[in-house]
Each structure stands twice: as C-alpha cells, then as structure tokens.
Amino acid sequence: MKCTKCGKYISDDHSYWAFDKPYCEKCYEESSKNCHICNVYLNMEDIFYDLTGNPLCSQCYAEKYEDEPNNPIVFDSDRKLILSLSRNCLNN
C-alpha cells in the first residue's frame, strides 16, 4: 500500500492508520498529534492550542476556555497579518 501523504510504499507491518487512511511513520507523526488532555488522535487541521502551545481537541478546548471572554487568542505573527490585511482593505 502507499502512504496517503507522501506516496511511499509501506508494508502492513509499517503502516499507521488514521481516519481509515494509511501513513508511513514519518508522515503520521508530521500530520497528527494527540490532545494534551484526553489523548484523542487529531488531524493537523483539527487542532486547537492552549496558551502554552499544547494541542487540544475542540471539546477539550471549549471546556478549558468556556469561561474566557469571546475575544480570540491572537499570536504576534497572526496579529501582524491581520493588521496588514486590514490596512490593505481600507486602502482599496
């Protein structure tokens, strides 16, 4: 069989499965993490992060931050992008 991500041929003994798709070990580790709280497997697209950078599933994130204000956590790198996009929008 072939790795879903890189296309490398892998044997049944060396395959890692996630969401019914096979991955080689390297791609599996690069494209997934486990929730820091409940340990559920997460696709990279489905990961939320806590304030210390630990990966969380959506349920654990909601439970941990449900009492937080509705203001999202914005990291410096994202803040610069948001400001740049806002300025470009206003200038047009």
Image (tube, rainbow, N blue to C red):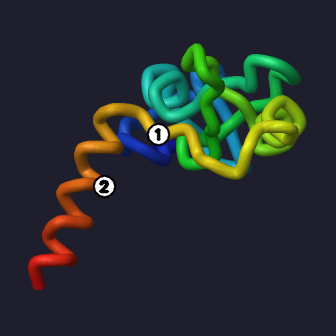
Q: Secondary structure at mark 1?
A: loop
Residue depicted at x 47% and y 44%: 2
* Residue 37 placement (x, y as % from top left): 83, 19
Residue depicted at x 77% and y 44%: 58
> Which residue has dot 2 on it?
82
* Residue 24 placement (x, y as % from top left): 49, 28
> Which residue has dot 1 on it?
74
Query: How crowded is the residue under tag 1: few (<14 C-alpha within 10 Å), some, or many (20+)?
Result: few
Q: Is residue 2 above or below residue 40?
A: below
Viewed as shown, does residue 26 lie left or right of 13?
Answer: left
Looking at the picture, which amino acid does disc 2 mark? Ile
Sequence-wise first label, 2 or 1: 1
Residue depicted at x 62% and y 48%: 71
Q: Is residue 90 above or below residue 78?
A: below
On the rendered image, what quadrant is the C terminus found in?
Answer: bottom left
In this view, the residue farthest toward the bottom is 92
Residue depicted at x 49% and y 47%: 4
Of residue 12 and residue 45, the one placed in the foreground of this image is: 45
To which quarter of the image does residue 83 belong?
bottom left
Which label is found at residue 90?
Answer: none
Task: Answer whether labels 2 and 1 touch (C-beta < 8 Å).
Answer: yes
